[in-house]
Image (tube, rainbow, N blue to C red):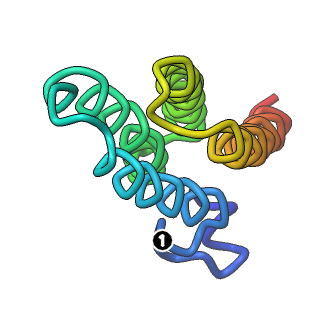
Amino acid sequence: MDNIQKNKIITVEQIPVWIKAHIFVLAIYKITNTFPKSELFGLISQIRRSSSSIPANITEGFYRNTTKELIQYLYNARGSLGESSYHLRLALDLGYISIQEYQNFKEEIDNIGKQINGWIKSLKGKIK
């Protein structure tokens, strides 16, 4: 966290990958409003929880005491990103979203994943 503060980022909401992840969650909530109501306690709940876990893990890691802990929470965020990716694929195969919607979400998933991976790599280089 010290390195982030040196770059004048003082809140988690200023971190670019957190912003992207939060926007992703908002889009997930919006699209899942169109899913069948029979999925309310199934796929809707699962995809909303896995997607919201991405920025939640980034936030928790940001407020931890060590860089090592932050890295662990970034790994957790990356895992939730993968889980969300699968849920979107399932939504596509079930006909709940279009191929274009799926591709748009996948592009965002790839971008968020690259940013998380880059941050992990940067942090690991600082703790050696």
- Please tell me how crowded label 1 is: few (under 14), some (14-19), or many (20+) other residues with Cα within 10 Å: few
In percent of width and height, residue 114 lies at 80, 41
Horizontal side, residue 22 vs residue 106: left or right: left
In percent of width and height, residue 29 lies at 34, 52
**Residue visible at 59% across and 29% down in the picture:** 78
Q: Quadrant of residue 35?
A: top left
In percent of width and height, residue 93 lies at 55, 18
Image vertical order of residue 55 relative to residue 99, above or below: below
Residue 15 appears in the figure: yes
Q: Quadrant of the N terminus?
A: bottom right
Q: How many marks?
A: 1
**Residue visible at 37% across and 32% down in the picture:** 47
Q: Which residue is mark 1?
A: 13
**What amino acid type is highlighted by mark number 1?**
Glu
Q: Quadrant of residue 118?
A: top right
**Residue visible at 51% across and 63% down in the picture:** 23
Q: Nearer the viewer, residue 31 or 70?
A: 31
Horizontal side, residue 15 vs residue 48: left or right: right
In percent of width and height, residue 42 lies at 22, 20
